[in-house]
Image (cartoon, rainbow, N blue to C red):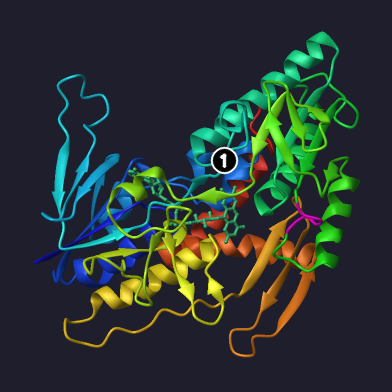
Amino acid sequence: METIVILGGGAGGLELATRLGDTLGAGKRARVLLVDRNPGHFWKPLLHTVASGKCDPRVEELSFPAQAMEHDFEFIQGEVLCMDRAHQTITLAPRKHSGSDGVCRTIAYDKLVLALGAVTNFYNVPGAADHALTLDSVDDAETFRRRFIDACIKAGEQKTQVDVVIVGGGATGVELAAELSNSARALAAYRVHTLNPETDIRISVIERGQHLLPQLHPQQANRAARQLRSLGIDVLTGTAVAQVTADAVIDAAGIAHRADLTLWAAGVEAPQLCATFGLAVNNLRQIVVDSSLCSTNDSQIYALGDCASYVCPIKGAAPPRAQVAHQQAMFLADLLSRRSGTPRPDFRYHDYGSLVSLGPQTAVGVLTGAVTGKSIRVGGATASLLYQLLYQKHLLNLHGTARVITQALVDWLRAKIVPPVKLY
Ligand SMILES: Cc1cc2nc3c(=O)[nH]c(=O)nc-3n(C[C@H](O)[C@H](O)[C@H](O)COP(=O)(O)OP(=O)(O)OC[C@H]3O[C@@H](n4cnc5c(N)ncnc54)[C@H](O)[C@@H]3O)c2cc1C
């Protein structure tokens, strides 16, 4: 039986493992094996809600072993260290907690799918990697949340202020700023800190471009900027960051923006590991793939999502987004299920638009018709509802309708009895 190994159980990798398990695994047509460094899956687009304390990752996290059992694939937890393409094996770090005698593990594959995601790109800005926090993982988001609460408590005791600087006015930076502003108020209401959230907690978003949210129409970007300003957030566009220090972000004009906490959300690149496989990569270390999402220099290796560089002949490079990872996962689920000898289809990316949350009740974005290709701009409560449905759609792909409805009911009940933000 052929062994298909998927490295990375994120937005794309887990959907692929689930679909292949349901088809090939259940029918004993192939052994499907998922590898991830974590024991559970958390949907990355929700990380800003973990950082703000709105979402408890322990509640939302999906257990890989449970999903594997329910969908006929195998799961191995481990950090991918390297790959031997000549012998078609990958090597995992020793099991955590196995002590000094832990040995590396080797896994053989017939076909390999790389779904390793992305990490923050600091663009070599001096001090950024040393002093700025990131939102690459649940641990990062939890670190930010705890540091924010600590900074607020300390500033309250010392009767000073807290300055948070978010570098990057894309979706991540904008969504985090809006959520954080709401959390600061909620934490004050629960008396976690004694600061006045309107005057003592200053949140700034610094963006190099002339507008926030470059993927949206400038009118919508302005709408987002107005919404952030109405929450008391400083929006600085046309401002490039030249340096980050322990307590400030210094822009290209030499102005220092005081920062107790700096969060870098200005771009992503593929993990360093991707450049070590001997596969063709682009300048962001993304694996270069052809129209079948197959590496251009190894026909047994595929790549999807943020770690892949797929360039559509008409629309150009696919962006690092969850909807790309999802579409590529569904494409590979179909491709890898085909009997050998059947023709390979070409992947086509459909941009269905983009939605950006601006707090609990409002969002902004654009929706693009699948057939007509026409775009309509959406905003307010309607956009907010559509934004929330994106996560439900991801859950639907993983669990099916009955479980998603049950989960939604549980979440609704839970929201009635727990505070709206994590308080410690
Ligand atoms: C805060 C935030 C907000 C976002 N908002 C949106 C949004 O609104 N809409 C949108 O479309 N996109 C959004 N994105 C982007 C979206 O999350 C990514 O495009 C998407 O998650 C990519 O999916 P992926 O499967 O390629 O990788 P990921 O989902 O990142 O998964 C990668 C997996 O690989 C595992 N892994 C990595 N390295 C190793 C290793 N060495 N060994 C073992 N396992 C490893 C990781 O643990 C992880 O589970 C957002 C991203 C962030 C950070």
Counting from the top left corner in percent of width and height, residue 48 is at: 63, 44
Q: Amino acid at mark 1?
A: Leu
Question: Label 1: which residue?
Answer: 135
Q: Position of residue 193 (x, y in %)?
A: 77, 20
Identify the image quadrant of the C terminus: top right
The answer to whether residue 361 is visible is yes
Q: Main secondary structure of the magenta part?
A: loop
Circle 1 crowding by C-alpha within 10 Å: few under 14, some 14–19, many from 20: many
Q: Which residue is painted at 34% across and 60% down in the image?
A: 280
SS state under label 1: loop
Relative to 4, say whether 419 is above or below.
Answer: above
Q: Nearer the viewer, residue 126 or 326?
A: 126
> Is 373 placed above or below 282 here?
below
Number of marks in picture: 1
**208 sits left or right of 87 in the view:** right
| Residue 424 lies within the magenta run | no
Ligand 1 near label 1 (Cβ, under 8 Å)? yes
Residue 72, percent across and down? 23, 61
Q: Nearer the viewer, residue 295 or 57?
A: 295
**Quarter holding residue 143:** top right
Residue 53 shows in this picture: no
Image quadrant assignment for residue 54: top right
Q: Which residues are magenta?
A: 209-213
